[in-house]
Amino acid sequence: MMAKALLIIDYTNDFVADKGALTCGASGQAIADSIVGLAHTFLKEGQWIILPTDLHVKGDPYHPETKLFPPHNLKDSWGRGLYGSLDEWYRLNKSSDHVYFMDKNRYSAFANTNLENYLRSRGIDELWLTGVCTDICVLHTAVDAYNKNFRLVVPRNAVASFSQSGHEWALNHFRTCLGASVVDA
Ligand code: ZN
């Protein structure tokens, strides 16, 4: 019996809150309850919850995102804090060894991180992808997961983007090219 993990990607104030530096705004805020509901369920079922979260240094001349986006998810900033009810859920459950908050520094949660080792060593072969943005960090994580033979599930009401057309495009791509089950959760 293989295990599954819920990935909650970049669900921080900068990406979700009204005052966030690179925010999805209302579409991002609307998925909070679905994400927290899934986190409760996964923990109750003895599955895994992983929170891959962007970590940046302001004005880093060596990082490609510096030219592309305003500064976001800076170390120890309010913007890098988890958003809303997820922050509360994390505070209550972070001591569980089935809850893993991890830094990342590229769109994909697999790039430059120990995520693959973490998953393989626990026998996790199915990933539920949630968070933001559907067509950026969720997409790039999904592509890497597909290339590494993980099974993918994307709950459509637990992912969001600042671009509605990008969101729709990515949901279609998950299904038609990455073999993901796109479900209501
Ligand atoms: Zn970033």
Image (cartoon, rainbow, N blue to C red):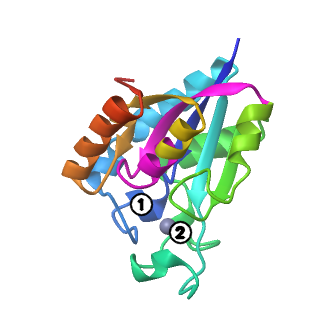
Q: In which quarter of the image is the N terminus?
A: top right
Instruction: Tell me the tag on residue 15.
Output: 1
Q: Looking at this view, is 90 or 65 the one in front?
A: 65
Q: Going by the image, does 70 lie left or right of 25?
A: right
Residue at far left of view: 165
> Which segment is the magenta one?
122-142
Residue at far top of view: 1
Instruction: Tell me the tag on residue 132.
Output: none
Other residues around mark 1 within 10 Å, as few (<14) / some (14–19) / many (≥20): many
Q: Position of residue 163 (x, y in %)?
A: 24, 55
Say which residue appears at 56% left-offset and 49% top-offset: 87
Q: Quadrant of residue 63?
A: bottom right
- Disc 1 residue type (three-letter): Phe
Other residues around mark 2 within 10 Å, as few (<14) / some (14–19) / many (≥20): many
- Disc 2 residue type (three-letter): Asn
Circle 1/circle 2 CB separation < 8 Å = yes
* Magenta run includes residue 10: no
Ligand 1 closer than 8 Å to label 2 CB? yes
Q: Quadrant of residue 98?
A: top right
Residue 157 visible in the shown view? yes
Compared with residue 64, is residue 178 higher up or lower down, i.e. above or below?
Answer: above
Q: Quadrant of residue 17?
A: bottom left
Under circle 1, the secondary element is: helix
Q: Position of residue 2 (x, y in %)?
A: 69, 17
Q: Where is residue 156 in the image (x, y as percent from the top left)?
A: 33, 32
Under circle 2, the secondary element is: loop
Say which residue appears at 39% left-offset and 30% top-offset: 155
> Badge 2 is on which residue?
73
Q: Going by the image, does 76 lie left or right of 24?
A: right
